[in-house]
Amino acid sequence: MIDDRSGRKDARDEWVFGGLDGGDERALIGCEWGSNVWAVEIRQACLLGGRKRPKEAERVEAEVKEDTFPVAVRLRRTHGHTDTLVLLPFDFAPPGGERKTLHGTPTFIPSLPAMQSFIGHLLVMAMSSRLVSSRRLQGPLRRLSSLSHVAPRRHGRSAFLPVATAFSNSAAPSRRTVSRATPPLHTASASGTDIEDKLADKRPVPIILLAGFLGSGKTSTLKHLLENNSNVKIGTIVNDVASVNIDAKLIANSSSRGDLVESGAQGVIELQNGCACCSIADELFSSIIELTQNGRRELDAIVIELSGVADPQAVVSNWKEETSRGHPATRIACLDKTVTLVDACTFGTDWMSWDVVADRDEWMQGESPTAVERKVPELLAEQVEAADLLLVNKIDIAGGEQSKVAKVVARGLNEKASVVETEYGRVDVNELLGNLLDQELEETDSRNTGNSHEHSHEHSGHDHEHSHSEHSEHEASSHSHDHGDHGDHDDESECNDPSHSHSHSHEHSSECSDPGCTDTSHSHSHDHGALAENHLGITSFVYKTAVPFNTSRLMVLLNSWPIPIKDNLDFASGESFVDEGAKDNVFRGVLRSKGFAWLSPANWGSREGCDNWRHETAMYWSHAGKHFGIETAGKWWAGLDKDQIRPYFANNMKEYERIMEEDWISDEWGDRRQELVFIGINLDEDAIRKELDHCLCTEEELAVYRKNVKRYIVREEAAVTMLRRELN
Ligand SMILES: Nc1nc2c(ncn2[C@@H]2O[C@H](COP(=O)(O)OP(=O)(O)OP(=O)(O)O)[C@@H](O)[C@H]2O)c(=O)[nH]1
């Protein structure tokens, strides 16, 4: 319930801001809140602030014009704080504040003066907790002070309802849970017999595998699916080869801050530190048991975002093998289809340029180029060949020729899959889900059981099966190498026949990734780098520290990184980006880097052009292939006390504990940190670390930073005091 003095409802209240005019408030969303705004919901319509999409902007317009005005708008920011912006009508003016029950919803309805005071208090609270800076509030404050001179418009009493609903909604428990731990296989009540009994009449939950090379757009597609589908209950499993699962954090964050409240998102399980097609294949099965709560949870579909180096065909093979063994997970769920993302910018013209591989020496720096150069295209080919649906993504930044080449090559590799061009994986969700929900149980049964010498990537709409003889050629060249990397395998390593008793994914001689293995003759290296290294020579590491980057030095470093497309860098004012395209660069082998970055403000103060907001703002760093971007990703949690943060996770304490354990890496700076995952070929980890370390603030710079933070806080507090005085 709303406490009318403070505007807070209960302990885990979201921050609520009010405004009285739709037009103004939209301006406020767009301008005043600028980069802090991530998602705005108007009822169920969703508008992504900062990257508004015309379609959604139009919907906003439509909502506001509707006679049903007022509208309730919930404003959310990623990675931390959640704000709610509520648009209220001018006719929000019953005499005095009153509490009522409207359509079964307990509601506080303030009068106009009460609203003004209410909004004022909220603004004070927001500033006190430094959710927003005083500068950013100047516009809203001006509007607030002018409200008393504006005559209220009348819209009828029924108009109160959406607002009331919005308040009550934000107090409603979230449906989402985010789990991290994956229990051991075949645990507790997950026995095959139990599940068999329970599931006797149940249809297995269809699984969609989301595949694609590093940075091709899998997470974007997953987010799109979750955000644009309100009817289907979707559980997700997110796999990453690195020890830190940035993608899962992004999806989980969306859940925590409620972006996916209206969607069918039903939980996120992280699978990290290895690849679900090989080194952590078993965990994939236990994750399905966990996600579905041993089959008790009602799910319409499960989407598994595979790591960028996963071979989906290997997952299919493992699945068949486990099906024949009667693994409980395979009774709960069934593989339905594989969707592969193809990066239009890089796919055809670069990674698939078999005849010009020598040109790609930048990957190798003279280190055994032949093997590595051969492998990446092969992985790409495997991913494409396994697809039922191919999404040729990033067409917005790919040239027409690049998109064409990507499509032609992909089509050449897999004639039977549907091909759709996309931006940010935005595809009609029906393409992804198809008539999956209407499929007959018999179909899925036969798919799970498999048929000895068939690739099983049939799916709703256009089933297709290939015999081994049809594929003998590509299998000889591409389906054998990755398993070969794990050590010795018998000649049947390519066979998918579940009736054959051979495991092609975990046998080892020189390299072993079995955490339980005690054989000292095996070279065990169980860190994330080793796990990734088992797969195509790709390694990864995490750069993590609680020291901010000096923005100027970071800019110089990025300038020297040979990536042609760089955008959203938004560095300190006065700096401009010049691509010097240095040839010898330690970052050359990096295929993908992503994570959270903390940049030191270069221009503290309160004037135009100051960037002290960086102190509060997490940046999302994302480099994939030839594209690098760094953009705001909401505020650090550290802007709040731990006690203030806790209520945001009332329904998901696991995530709160995870943040405190993993992200809150220093007492002084909280979760402000660099947490960057680097994935690539023959990475010179030490050299990259050294380059990044060089960009960190020095002790002297940190001392200045500390001083400026103190001044910044004093200034903010003074602004709050002034506002309080004005309000009283
Ligand atoms: N311009 C543009 N950028 C895109 C598009 N799709 C994805 N991106 C960006 O490319 C980067 C990688 O996208 P993700 O969706 O994280 O890719 P991913 O396949 O999940 O990446 P990994 O999990 O690391 O393999 C992000 O910065 C995205 O914002 C697109 O269609 N156009």
Image (spheres, rainbow, N blue to C red):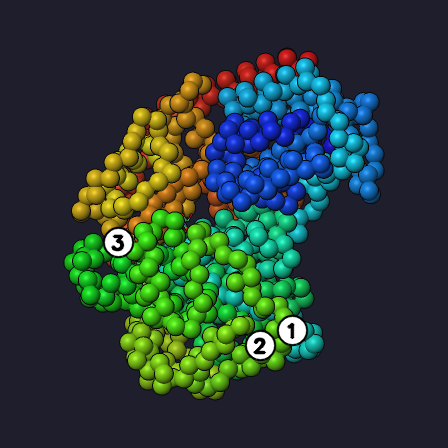
- Side (left or right) of 387 relative to 490: right
Q: Choose the circle earlier in sequence order: 1 or 2.
A: 1
Quick one: 689 or 27, which is closer to the camera?
27
Q: Which x, y percent locates residue 348?
A: 30, 61
Helix, strand or loop for disc 2 = helix
- Quadrant in the picture for residue 342: bottom left
Tell me the residue at 56%/66% (across/down): 434
Can residue 590 be seen by looking at this rendering? Answer: yes
Can residue 643 be seen by looking at this rendering? Answer: no
The answer to the question of whether label 2 and label 3 lie on touching residues, with beta carbons closer than 8 A, is no
Report which residue position mark 3 lands on: 589
Report which residue position mark 2 lands on: 444
Helix, strand or loop for disc 3 = helix
The answer to the question of whether label 1 and label 2 lie on touching residues, with beta carbons closer than 8 A, is yes
Disc 1 beta carbon < 8 A from ligand 1? Answer: no
Residue 203, numbered circle: 1
Q: Choose the circle earlier in sequence order: 1 or 3.
A: 1
The answer to the question of whether label 1 and label 3 lie on touching residues, with beta carbons closer than 8 A, is no
Q: Which x, y percent locates residue 691?
A: 26, 41
Q: What amino acid type is highlighted by mark number 2?
A: Thr
Q: Residues within 10 Å of mark 3 (few under 14, many from 20)?
A: many
Q: Residues within 10 Å of mark 1 (few under 14, many from 20)?
A: some
Quick one: 506 or 722, which is closer to the camera?
722
- Side (left or right) of 700 relative to 234: left
Tell me the residue at 50%/29% (across/down): 31
Disc 3 beta carbon < 8 A from ligand 1? Answer: no
Quadrant location of the C terminus? top right
Q: What amino acid type is highlighted by mark number 3?
A: Gly
Tell me the residue at 45%/37% (across/down): 632
Residue 527, numbered circle: none
Q: What amino acid type is highlighted by mark number 1?
A: Arg
